[in-house]
Image: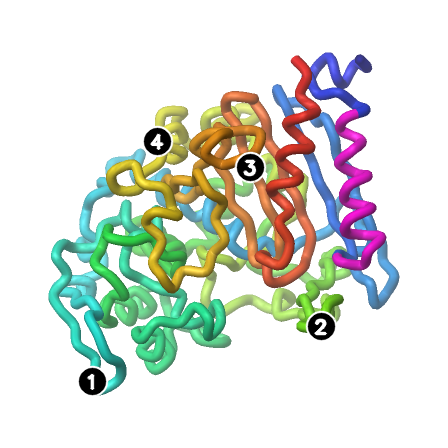
Amino acid sequence: MDARSEWTGLDAGRLARIGEHLQREHIDTGRLAGCQIAIARHGHIAYARSFGLMDRERGKPVREDTLWRIYSMTKPITAVALMMLYERGLFQLDDPVARFAPAWRGQRVWVSGEGADMVTEPARRPVTIRDLLRHTAGLTYGGQLGPYAEVPVDALYKAANVLGPGSTDSMETFLDKLGRLPLAYQPGSAWMYSLASDACGALVEVISGRPLAEVFREEIFAPLSMNDTAFLVPAERLDRLAANYRQEPGGGSGLADDPAASSYAHEPGFKSGGGGLVSTTADYLRFCEMLRRGGELDGARILGPRTVELMHMNHLPDGADVAQLAHPADVVGVAPGTGFGLGFAVTRGQVQSGGLGGCDYYWGGAASTIFWVDPKEDLSVVFMTQLMPSEVIDFRGPLKNLVYSAIVD
C-alpha cells in the first residue's frame, strides 16, 4: 500500500480501473466529451482525475476548476437550507404547506379527463413539507421532462406558465400558482419527481424572509468555502464553464449549451432550488464531506448530526421503495432497492439494489452528474460531466462497483 492507500483503505491499483473504465467506455468512444471524478474516504482524497474535453468545439481539456451545470444536484442543497430552518423551530415536517402558502388550502386532486372535462376530488389530507422533500406531494414537472412524462394536469401547468422558459415569477407567485392547480394524485399515495424541490426553495425564502440565493451564499457556500457555486457564472469565470451536450437520436451528441452564449452568464429571474446551480467538483465534494461528517466541515457547522441522519432515512410511507410507490407516469430511473429521504435517494441494501455499497444516499443531475455519500464506509464520491438527458447512460451502477471493489480494509 502507498501512503494514500493507508489513509483511505482504497487500493491504488484497483482505483486505477475507474480511469480505465471512463476512458475506454466513454471518452475513447465519444459518448462523453469529458468528465471528472473525485473520491474521498476518511476525509482524505483517494482519487481525483479529469478526462477528455470540457469544450469539444474549442478543444479545451477538462481542468481542475471546470464549472459544471449540476441541475438537480441543486436539490440536496435546497433540502439542507430548508432543514436549517427546521432546526431553528420554524416548522415541523408534517406542517401543511398551506401554513406558509395560503393558496394550498382546499386543494383538489385529478380523477379523470382533461381540459374542460377534467374531474377532480378534494385532497384527503393537506400536502406537507415532508411530502415536498420526499416527492409525494401530488405535484408534477409540468411536462418539462418531455411528452412521455406528461399527465393531464401538466396542460394546466403550461397554461399557468408555471416555471415556463425565462420565468421571472417571485417565489410567492410560484407557490400561489402551484397551490391553485389540481394535484396529480392524492398526497402521500405515490412518488413522482416534480417541482417539489423548487417549492422547497420558495419555502426557504418565505419562511426565512431572505432571498434563496442569499441563504445559499451566506449560510452554506461561504461557511463551506464553496466559492464557485452559484446561480450565475460571472464574466471572469465563463472560460471555465464546460459545454453541455445532448444525446442525438441516431447516436453521438450535439451541443446543447455553448459556454460563450450560455444563459448561465445572466442572472436568472427565478432562482431554481430544483436545478439552477453551477458548481465545481471540489465545491460539491466539500458539500458531500459536510454531510459525511454529520453536518460540519473545517469548523463550520451547517446542520446537527441527528438532522443529517434523519434526512438520509427512508421517509416513504410504510417503508416502501420508490419502485413500489412510483406513479405510472414517472420516468426517473431510480435503481431498485431505493427509498427516499428528505432531499436524497437512499440505497436500502446491497441485495436489494443489486450492487456493491448498500448504505449510501445520493442524487444526480440532468446532465449526468452524480454524487453519493456513504456514512458506513466514510466515503464521498462526486462525478461530473455534461450529457443530457441523464438516463442515457448508467454511470452510477458501474462506478459504485468500481469504487467499492477498491476498498480493501
Nearer to us: label 2 or label 1: 2
**Label 4–label 3 contact, CB within 8 A:** no
Residue 15 counted in the magenta span: yes
342 is higher (above) or lower (below) than 187: above
Count how many numbered circles sit on residues in the image.
4
Q: Quadrant of residue 382?
A: top right
Disc 2 from disc 1: Cα separation: 39 Å
Q: Which residue is mark 4?
A: 310
Helix, strand or loop for disc 2:
loop
**Label 4–label 1 contact, CB within 8 A:** no
Q: Percent x, y for residue 103?
A: 19, 66
- Predominant secondary structure in magenta? helix
Helix, strand or loop for disc 4:
helix
Instruction: Mark 3: give few (<14), some (14-19) or many (20+) Cα within 10 Å.
Output: many
Q: Looking at the image, which residue sits at the far bottom?
A: 116
Q: What amino acid is at disc 1?
A: Asp
400 is higher (above) or lower (below) than 114: above
Determine whether, in the image, residue 309 is placed left or right of residue 254: left
Q: Which residue is mark 1?
A: 117
Q: Earlier in the sequence, mark 2 or mark 3?
A: 2
The residue that appears at 66% across and 38% down in the rendered structure is: 399
Q: Quadrant of the C terminus?
A: top right
**Label 3–label 1 contact, CB within 8 A:** no
Between 93 and 240, the one lying in front of the other is 93
Q: Which residue is mark 2?
A: 250
Nearer to us: label 3 or label 1: 1
Q: What amino acid is at disc 3?
A: Trp
Q: Which residue is mark 3?
A: 372
